[in-house]
Image: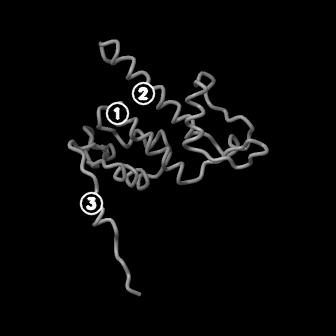
């Protein structure tokens, strides 16, 4: 943690927000069936409303049930990756976060590249360990060229 009090407060707020995001991501199907989602008790009401508004949709308005479609789950994963990058000073070990999130490496690499990170492979110090994937956000940040992303226009 930083020595400066203001920087320490900012970093601890980032860590708490990341914890709330991870708690929302970790909800199981049976949790979504409940009327009240089992989120942490100490989460502020304003933050809870923001998270539910950004990452869930009302599945049944009469029973106040919520659901998280795949596109919003991917959005939540991107937020988690960005918060991890901010906390770790824009270098994130993807092997660690993959175990925490319990998602496939291919999907994690796709989302990492979608937010603009370069992925580097690094051999561990020990010869028996697996290759580590490190996501690095390059500076200056380069946005993708929209003319190349259009794809093939078929004249069929």
Earlier-in-chain disc, 1 versus 2: 2
Res 81 → quadrant = top left
Q: Which residue is mark 3?
A: 145
CB atoms at circles 3 and 2 under 8 Å apart?
no
Mark 3: few/some/many CA within 10 Å (<14, 14-19, 20+): few
Image check: 36 left or right of 134?
A: right
Q: Which of labels 3 and 2 is toward the front?
A: 3
For the point 68% across and 43% down, which residue is it? 32
- Residue 14 numbered mark, or none: 2
The front one of 87 and 139 is 139
CA gap, disc 3 to disc 2?
31 Å
Res 66 → quadrant = top right
User: What is the x, y in percent for residue 114?
Assistant: 36, 53
Residue lying farthest to the bottom in this orientation: 156
The front one of 131 and 1 is 1
Q: Which residue is mark 1?
A: 86
Residue lying farthest to the right in this orientation: 62
Q: Secondary structure at mark 1?
A: helix
Residue lying farthest to the left in this orientation: 140
Earlier-in-chain disc, 3 versus 2: 2
Mark 2: few/some/many CA within 10 Å (<14, 14-19, 20+): some
CB atoms at circles 1 and 2 under 8 Å apart?
yes
């Amino acid at each position: 943690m930083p020595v400066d009090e203001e920087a320490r407060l900012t970093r601890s707020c980032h860590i708490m927000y990341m914890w709330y995001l991870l708690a929302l991501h970790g909800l199981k199907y049976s949790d979504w069936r409940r009327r009240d989602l089992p989120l942490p008790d100490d989460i502020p009401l304003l933050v809870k409303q923001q998270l539910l508004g950004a990452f869930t949709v009302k599945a049944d308005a009469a029973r106040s049930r919520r659901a998280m479609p795949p596109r919003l789950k991917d959005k939540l994963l991107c937020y988690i990756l960005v918060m991890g990058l901010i906390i770790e000073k824009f270098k994130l070990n993807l092997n660690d976060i993959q175990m925490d999130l319990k998602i496939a490496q291919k999907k994690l690499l796709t989302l990492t590249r979608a937010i603009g990170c370069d992925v580097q492979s690094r051999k561990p110090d020990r010869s028996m360990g697996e290759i580590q994937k490190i996501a690095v956000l390059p500076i200056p940040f380069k946005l993708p060229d929209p003319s190349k992303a259009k794809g093939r226009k078929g004249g069929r």
